[in-house]
Amino acid sequence: MGGGWAAWFARRISLSLLTLFLLSLVVFAGGQLLPGDVGREVLGPLADPRAVAALDHQLGVDRPLLLQYLGWIGGILHGNMGSSLEFRAPVAPFIGAALVKSLKLAAVAFIIVVPLSIGAGVAAAIRVGTLADRVISLAGLSLTVIPEFVSSIVVILIFSVWLRVLPISASWTAGAGPLDQLRHLILPAIPLVVVLFGYIARMARAGTIEALEADYTRTAILKGLPRFVVLRRHVLRNALLPTITVIATQTSYLVGGLVVVETLFRYQGIGSLILTAATSKDFPMLEAGILTVGVIYIVVTLIADALAVLSNPRLAPGMGG
Amino acid sequence: MSAEQSVSAVRPLAETKQEVLEDSQAPTRWEVLRRSGTFWAGGGIVGFWALAALLGPRLVPWDPYATDLLHELAPPSAAHWFGTDQLGRDIFSRVIVGSRDILTIAPLATLLGTFAGATLGLAGGYLGGLFDIILGRIIEVLVSLPLIIVALLVLVALGPSSVTVVIVIGLVFAPVIARTVRAAVLGERALDYVAAAELRGENALAIMFVEILPNVMGPVLVETTARLGYAIFTVASLSFLGFGIQPPSPDWGLTIAENYGVIAGGYWWAVAFDAAATASLVVGVNLLADGLYGALAA
């Protein structure tokens, strides 16, 4: 068994590294190849050709492509993510500060959505086929596809404009305490919760139904164990495993959602940093931001897969049986 | 129903028995679809917006582009049912006509993704071997990238235009559809009709597109409808961010981006109707996909 686990892990790590390499190629192509003449893009169509050539040389974009890629990726591996064209300063501190803010927002969203959606999914599964199940399933199915900017508008109108109970902007004044920060993060978290709810609830429901129909559950019921003990010990433990993986894969949707939500609520996280860099054609900042969220996503899915396989070795293909 | 049964009554006994069983126990896909509430609700919503996109400009009471600086941000009234925006344009007319661009770009992107993905999936599933292994790895890597971000990067690099949006979203969706089609093709690969076609000497392209494709259309159709929902989600979000549909289109995402600054002043109608329109369209497409999926699973 140990050998199988190591082989699975080696294969999974190599897949992550391959994904990482491909992501770096995409980011490199998007940031340095596709724009054509970067200096011209940055300085505009009316700039002096000599200034454009000088900027190209300064950025190193007049070198052969392979050298450019190696220089870029080598710099990143040594912790040098490049300098922002917009702020004329290294990008790393900007990325770091924005990341902390985004993690706060994402944490609030996950703290709300994980118990809510798992609870709803399990509740639907226990009453499968009833009206409650149908309502929960349909709500999940519909909410999942509502773009974040639409649900943002709805919550802003209700809670900020009409009821006036929560702030319309997510940015707090300097020195705000944790509770005040939380108050600013509730509204922006809701659109993220709305999108994530459907997926997680659907997986929790499917996993619970499967576990309820399994032989070990029947055995536990026939042994005469109380209903909630069966649910907690036999059903939930097996049902929630696949849900962990789903939650991890949702980080990629979450990143897309952060771009929209942070822009709308004027919150200086990694999403709005990426969008600002995109709008001002600040390619080093854009590349560093996208690479950062890509790496986070790859690491999170790797950890989730490893957790799932560790707790249920049958999930790993080619292991045991 | 009764006509089908009377026809089957004159067939050989073994076959009749089978058909009667199927008729009485498992309803056919069409029956499931006909009775599916989600399918009809979704179809109704999508049909409404499709009509609005086709006929909108002829039906609306005002010119959606005509500004009226004397009636900026006027609340909903008998003259302007949904009120007017910051330039005095009629919001009702803009919401109806605003369905046109997104209902052109999102389906085109979905079609491109379906065509590219189905071709790759058919080739991988049918040809197998090294090609399939390499394709499988590439797909596995591509579907694990944060795709909205990748789409955003490419759009920034190439400059936003409707054609770029169609191509980028189509290419981003292709591996997802390829994965579904490949799985379905693997199930068909070993069946007799494929072997028969090979014995007849048909070439690989004909076998993939003429023999196998019609038999995997079910999963392809469901995946395509579900992808259409995501395409609308993505195009709308990109338009909101400024990298999708461009001004002066009355597109919903674009309108919300242009007007959400005024809602703090209480001008809710400047964005509320566009938000409701976007939500209804994505939910409608998703209900349609769910109905189709239910019928396919029957």
Image: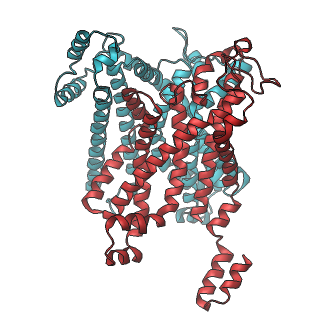
Place of residue A213 in the rendered image (x, y in percent of width and height, measured from the top left): 57, 63
Percent coordinates x, y for residue B240 in the rendering: 54, 27
Any part of residue B5 in sight: yes
- Image quarter in which the N terminus of chain B is found: bottom right
Q: Residue at x 56, y 37 (%)?
A: B102
The residue sitting at 59% across, 20% down in the picture is B258
Pick the quarter of the image with the C terminus of chain B: bottom right
Q: Is residue B272 above or below residue A280?
A: below
Q: Quick one: which residue is furthest to the right in this view?
A: B78
Q: Is residue A266 left or right of residue B135?
A: right
Return the x and y of residue B148 as percentages of the image width and height.
Answer: 45, 35
**Residue at the location (71% across, 50% down)?**
A132
Residue A251 in sight? no
Q: How is the image coloured?
A: by chain
* Relative depth, front residue between B269 and A210: B269
Please provide percent x and percent y for residue B186. 39, 65
Asked if residue B182 is positioned above or below residue B106 in the image, the reply reads below
Q: Which chain does the red colour mark?
A: B
Residue at 33% across / 19% down in the picture? A41
A32 to B177, vertically: above or below: above
Q: Is residue B170 left or right of residue B276?
A: left
Label tally: 0
Q: Quadrant of residue B150?
A: top left
Q: Which chain is cyan?
A: A
Image position of B99 (left or right of B203): right
**Nearest the camera: B214 or A4?**
B214
- Of residue A238 and residue A21, the one placed in the foreground of this image is A21
